[in-house]
Amino acid sequence: MGDKLKIVDEIRSFNRYYTKLLGLLNNQLLNSKYSLTEARILYEIHAGEKVTATQIISELGIDKGQLSKIMRNLEKYGLITRKASETDGRVILISLSPSGKKVYNELDAASNQQINDMISVIPEGNQKQLTACMQEIKMILINSSTDDVRKRS
């Protein structure tokens, strides 16, 4: 059991380091007025172009009430639009407004710049090693059905 506790401690230590490195615990992401959760929701809407709240909940594992509150704020900021589906009026499709696309693009560019700045001091060979390790971590977690474990927690 001691090895298991050490593994848990190492993973938690890495998570604390990485969230601090990226400033993810700040209320505003990338010196914007938006939180990490709001930015991720904007990303999901951008990626899907027209999505439903159910799709966002499924993709992010976010609570329905929390999503509803954030969506109201994003709508109040003029970043999203909601429209009934043409094929099923009960389904509400969410998309980015022109202002929402602008904010998304600004956040995306700032995020790219942040990562570029972070890795620019790392030699190119180590950058490739870093991304290979990240891909390996991702595959181990995907192949271990961590989504099922997370849902049971």
Image (cartoon, grey):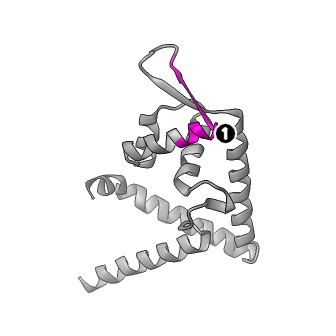
Q: Name the quarter where the N terminus is drawn.
A: bottom left
Q: Is residue 47 left or right of residue 63?
A: right
Amino acid residing under circle 1: Gly
Residue 150, given in percent of the width and then of the height, sits at 33, 57
| Residue underneath mark 1 | 100
**Region of the chain picked out in magenta, as a range:** 73-85
Which residue corresponds to the image point at 38% horizontal and 80% vertical from the top-left?
9
Q: Name the quarter where the C terminus is drawn.
A: bottom left
Q: Is residue 7 left or right of residue 17?
A: left
Identify the residue at the far front of this view: 76
Residue 10, given in percent of the width and then of the height, sits at 42, 80
Q: Secondary structure at mark 1?
A: helix
Residue 138, given in percent of the width and then of the height, sits at 48, 60
Residue 70, given in percent of the width and then of the height, sits at 49, 45
Above or below: residue 15 compared with residue 146: below
| Residue 121 image-quadrant placement | bottom right
